Amino acid sequence: MAREMVRLREARRAYLRFHAHCFWSSPPEFRIERSDVAWVAEQLMGHGGREAWEKGASLCR
């Protein structure tokens, strides 16, 4: 449970940090939930640079 909460927190931070590059079609105030973590990781890895890809990969572990 604690690990899931850490992943959720990191996904929320990544969404805000990489919003302009990876999530521009979604509103900045969109609230990331547990069910969205995989989507965030996929978007980071597919549309971001190396730093975003690494963050996405870390969310998949």
Image: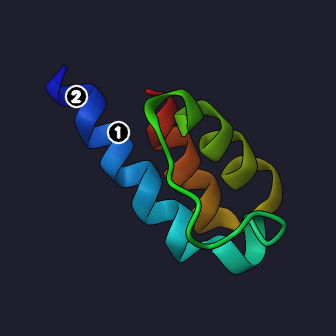
Q: Is residue 6 left or right of residue 22?
A: left
Looking at the rendering, in which quadrant would you find the C terminus? top left
Along the viewing direction, whichever of 24 and 59 lies nearer the viewer: 24
Which residue is most to the bottom?
Answer: 20
* Quadrant housing residue 41: top right
Residue type, mark 2 in image: Arg
Q: State the CA–CA distance, disc 1 to disc 2.
A: 6 Å
Task: Pinpoint residue 46: horizontal percent, then vertical percent.
Answer: 81, 50
Q: Mark 1 = which residue? A: 7
| Residue at position x 75%, y 65% in the image | 22
Does the CB distance between marks 1 and 2 fall below 8 Å?
yes
Quadrant of the rendered image containing residue 38: top right
Q: Residue 29 in the image: state x and y as whole percent.
A: 56, 69
Amino acid, disc 1: Arg
Q: Nearer the viewer, residue 60 or 33?
A: 33
What's the residue at 25%, 35% (across, down)?
Answer: 5
Q: Which residue is mark 2?
A: 3
Q: What's the coloring here?
A: rainbow
